[in-house]
Amino acid sequence: MEQLGGCLCGAVRYHVTAAPLRVTFCHCRFCQRATGAAYAVEPIFSEADFEMLSGETKTYTHVSEGSGKNIDVHFCGNCGSTVRYVLYRFPGVTGILAGTFDDPNWFKWDAETAKHIFLSAARPETVVPADMPLFAHHALSNDDTAIERLMLDAPTPVGDIDDI
């Protein structure tokens, strides 16, 4: 199940050899700034299932405001495209920015494999799907205790959700 991807200019190329472990839709300010979008779509892979094929990325290390742990942002030094994150909080995995895949729609997500996090920072007009785990902040506390999830019965704009 090889899937290819890379940066905007094509200097950086990679592949993954398995489906993502999970898919995170992250609305935090860090992801908004890092992607230049309202939120990041980030399929998470085992590091063993990811390989750089060509080019080299530059790395910016950022300290997470939430966990206090480092996040390495890997980007193309030529075109600036953010390709992936290495999250020190979750060793052994890497988050690929979905838009960098040659086919960004190849992977599946559903309520069992995906979640929306940091909705407290989301744009109020962002519509989140029904039957999807939603979290005001992260899905785990800093001591890795699971946070109670919110589930909606219908697609809803974030600004209309009272519990966020």
Image (cartoon, rainbow, N blue to C red):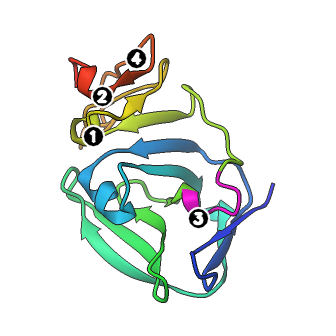
The label shown at residue 100 is 3
Discs 4/2, front: 2
The label shown at residue 123 is 1
Check whether the beta carbons of the residues at disc 4 and disc 2 lie within 8 A of each other.
Answer: no
- For marks 4 and 2, the one nearer the N-term is 4
Q: Position of residue 54 (x, y in %)?
A: 67, 85
What's the residue at 48%, 83% (across, down)?
79
Q: Position of residue 111 (x, y in %)?
A: 54, 25
Residue where numbered disc 2 is placed: 158
The label shown at residue 151 is 4
Query: Cα distance, mark 4 to mark 2?
Result: 12 Å
Q: Does dot 4 land on a helix, a strand or a loop? A: loop
Discs 4/3, front: 3
- For marks 1 and 4, the one nearer the N-term is 1
Amino acid type, residue under disc 2 in the picture: Val
Query: Cα distance, mark 2 to mark 1?
Result: 7 Å
Q: Is residue 162 left or right of residue 79?
A: left
Check whether the beta carbons of the residues at disc 2 and disc 1 lie within 8 A of each other.
Answer: yes
Classed neighbour count for the residue bearing mark 2: other residues with Cα under 10 Å, few (<14), some (14–19), many (≥20): some
